[in-house]
Amino acid sequence: MKNITLKRYSQLGDTLLYDALLEHLNPKNSFAKKQMNINSMPYANVKYCVRLLPKIKDWQDVYQLFSICYDVTEKDFWKAGVTEYFSARKFILKELERVVLTENKVMSSQSTDGHLWKLAGAEKLNPYNDTLPLVQLGKLLGQYPFDLGRKPYGEIFSLLAQTKLQNEVEADYRKLSVQ
């Protein structure tokens, strides 16, 4: 088996031999001589990649994901070796999974008023799950939410986590002070 280019791999009729072997490669943060740092990527790009991942249906979608994550040109993408692609793909999947798990863990709350929130129509907000935190942060900081979306993911996530924790402590304090 040769380390063919992605262009050649995408043109193969039967990729079963390559897929079976290359699926077992370890994740590696390297593609076309570039590395990905999810914490320094813009917040909006990370959220877009998370939404894009389950919708990937063809090589153009794969290229779009790699161009965002590794900042590669289409020419460099297709010139890359298939082994490099499989390792980098595995790295992207692990990183995005880590982001989702961390966000779910940090941003989840055990509110006793959760059922009231759902009754009030919280599911109507679901299409805006990516931007609503930026709107709240924008109000707090006096900044345009979409400008915040261009800031590094690590910075925005840190501010969101801090704000959430502060809101929870303030809510608990209000409950205690009423008693």
Image (cartoon, rainbow, N blue to C red):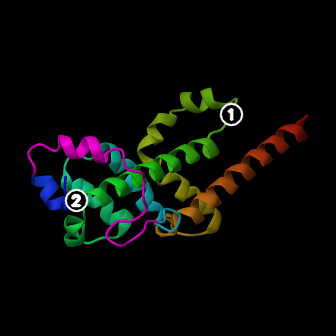
Magenta segment range?
Answer: 12-36
Hey, what amino acid is under mark 2? Answer: Asn
Q: Is residue 40 visible?
A: yes
Quarter placement of the C terminus: top right
How many numbered tags mark residues here? Answer: 2
Q: Callout 2 environment at 10 Å: few (<14), some (14 to 19), or many (20+)?
A: few
Q: Are marks 1 and 2 in contact (CB under 8 Å)?
A: no
Please name whichever residue, 77 or 167, is drawn nearer the observer in this view of the structure. Answer: 77
Examine the structure image and report whether residue 27 is included in the region drawn in magenta: yes
Q: Is residue 97 above or below residue 114?
A: below
Identified at 57% across, 42% down, the residue is 104
Most frequent secondary structure within the magenta stretch: loop
- In this rendering, position of residue 12 left or right of residue 58: left
Please name whichever residue, 36 or 25, is drawn nearer the observer in this view of the structure. Answer: 25
- Which quarter of the figure has residue 143? bottom right
Examine the structure image and report whether residue 50 is included in the region drawn in magenta: no
User: In the image, residue 1 lies at what x, y percent?
Assistant: 19, 52
Q: Is residue 138 visible?
A: no
Q: Secondary structure at mark 1?
A: loop
Q: Which mark is residue 111?
A: 1
Hey, what amino acid is under mark 1? Answer: Ser
Q: Which mark is residue 12?
A: none
Q: Secondary structure at mark 2?
A: loop
The nearer-to-camera label among 1 and 2 is: 2
Which residue carries the number 2 mark?
A: 3
- Which quarter of the figure has residue 47? bottom left
Identified at 19% across, 72% down, the residue is 75
User: In the image, residue 175 lies at what x, y percent?
Assistant: 83, 38
Q: Is residue 84 above or below residue 104?
A: below
